[in-house]
Image (tube, coloured by chain):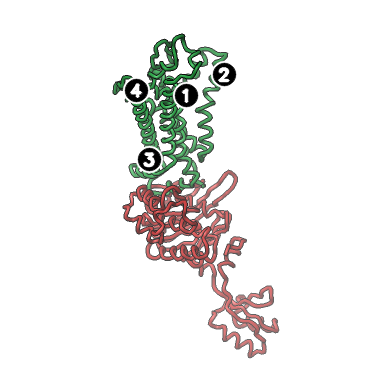
Amino acid sequence: MSAAADVSPSRVVETRGLTKHYGGIVAVDGLDLNVNRGEVYGFLGPNGAGKTTTLRMLLGLIRPTSGVAKVVGERPGTPASLGRVGAIVESPAFYPYMSGYDNLRLLAIYCGVPLTRVGSALEQVELTPRAKHKFSTYSMGMKQRLGVAAALLKEPELLILDEPTNGLDPQGMADVRNLIVSLGKGQRTVLVSSHLLGEVEQMCTRIGVIRKGKLVAEGTIDELRGAASLKVRATPGGKARELLEKEAGAENVTVLDDGSFSLKVDLARAAEINRHLVTAGVDVTELHVDERTLTDIFIELTGTEGGL
Amino acid sequence: MLSAFRGELFKTLRRPAVWVCIGALIILSVLIGYVLLGFVYAHPPKGSSSSLPAGTTLSVFLVTLYPINFIKSTLSFWGDLGGVFALIIGVLLQGSEFGWGTVKTLYTQRSGRLTMMAGKLATLAVMVLIMVLALFAAAAVSSLVVATLEGADKTFPAADEIIKGIAACFLIYWFWALLGLALATIFRQSAMAIGIGLAYALVLETAVFGLLGIGGGEWVNSIHQWFPIANVGYLIDSFGAVRIRGLRTSATPFADATHAVTMLVVYAVAFVAVTVWFSRQRDVTA
């Protein structure tokens, strides 16, 4: 893997043509990912799309077959990169015979972080009361929170969290989501992978959608949704179409399968269009703003329904 | 490197399984090596002396349990058998990382993979040293107790013999521990590594060369001299057998201590190279 020639200073993660083959299987296929400083980036895709493989490549756990990756401006997996990145990859893994506190102390020793950071990291994830208990006695939610505390220990510029709410109950999921949102405030960048659409919608400022190892879309949720349209159902259909094409222009009117119309117009004109139709003797039975949901986008891009 | 070593030591010293392993070796060495043998030698069962020269009883073997012989006795009894405990420690230190999934945790901290492995190797060396020192300390104390009970001489061997004995045992155990570490790295688990390691230590080499030895002659020894267990034997034999009145001393070993040390060091270096190569090259997918 050669070094990236030019990396934007605002880019915390940048990959170009990142590819991973396992024998004949292509797990990640020419991925061009861009994560900007200070954003909470949602890495979205169905199970098996290549999310975890990508994140492992960003951490140096997996060597790419080809392509270039830069993480905080450094080659993935090098001490210069790892020192500035905190991560949870799949389920958090710790030593079961040691307490949560000792596990964090261990990581603090490995990272050369002052031991005083351990207490504050535990406090940040509200795990202090159980800190002295063995890791093996922790619930799934507590393990996940300890994982987040471990990732925060280095006070990293970039947090990489792979499916951080996996296996949590609804309350645990909400807690972790809130935590991620709060961690993403300020200059810290969070790259969080998930197959849960609602979760990504609540947490992320920008998303990338991966399908069969390829990045099929990247942008803010609003960008991916595109402009909202006006949906109109009116009778008689022929007269309604004629009037709507006159109002919005023929190229901006689409007849949908159910006989209704989709109009690409300034949404502020909704009342005016309604008035014109009614005045012309057309009965309007339905008129509303039609905005694509993230689920619509996900299904369209990946051909699957994201878990909810 | 220092932080990797400190971290490895921190978690290894807190790991009960490691202490169970060391403790088991020490307890067995005292129970079998001194309590059981001491009792049998002091109170020989009827008929137990039939294979010994006329007028000789098992009680002449009590001398092997006295302080002057504690280095030779410990090496001849536990130099070989104790290796399996070192093998298990080597496996535990690496194999469990795969079992718990902590390899990814280790490799996503600040240091690179080679530094982390260097820390693990240094920690393994410390644990093996603790094991060897505890083994000889327990043997020294036990031999002193036997000598006191029997009213025998309480003189210990010369310091240089003690140091040489500890160094030899450390090399033997270090070799086994590194074999365990390499097997656990290759198989990415503990069970398979312990199984194959024990099969080799207890059965494979001994059985193969034992069978070849039935029909073979010098050529079997000339091949066997390059294998690890043979060299463990040469190194132990280089300390000589305890001289017992009325009994012939054992045959001179096929190769000397220099050959044995060289071969064991070569094997140790090879195991380190294998471990480092696999740790560095492999993707961490679990």
Instruction: Give the colour chain A carries in the figure.
Output: red
Of the numbered discs 1 and 3, the one sitting upstream in the chain is: 3
Query: In the figure, residue A14 lies in which quadrant?
Result: bottom left
Q: Chain of mark 2?
A: B
> For the residues marked 3 and 4, what is the alpha-carbon distance in whole angstroms?
42 Å
Q: Is there any visible trace of residue B69 in the rendered image?
A: yes
Which amino acid type corresponds to the residue marked 3 in the rendered image? Gly
**Is the residue at mark 1 from the same chain as the one at mark 4?**
yes
Contact flag, marks 2 and 1 (Cβ < 8 Å): no
Of the numbered discs 3 and 4, the one sitting upstream in the chain is: 3
> For the residues marked 2 and 3, what is the alpha-carbon distance in whole angstroms?
41 Å
**Is the residue at mark 3 from the same chain as the one at mark 4?**
yes
Contact flag, marks 2 and 4 (Cβ < 8 Å): no
Nearer the camera: disc 1 or disc 3: 1
The residue at the point 34 percent across, 44 percent down is B3
B102 to B273, vertically: above or below: below
Tell me, for residue B229, which label it has, or none.
1
Residue B271: where, in percent of width, then height? 45, 32
Which amino acid type corresponds to the residue marked 2 in the rendered image? Leu
* Label 1 residue SS: helix
Q: Which chain is green?
A: B
Which amino acid type corresponds to the residue marked 1 in the rendered image? Ile
Nearer the camera: disc 3 or disc 4: 4
Of the numbered discs 1 and 4, the one sitting upstream in the chain is: 4
**Is the residue at mark 1 from the same chain as the one at mark 3?**
yes
Which amino acid type corresponds to the residue marked 4 in the rendered image? Ala
> For the residues marked 2 and 4, what is the alpha-carbon distance in whole angstroms?
41 Å
* Residue carrying label 2: B211
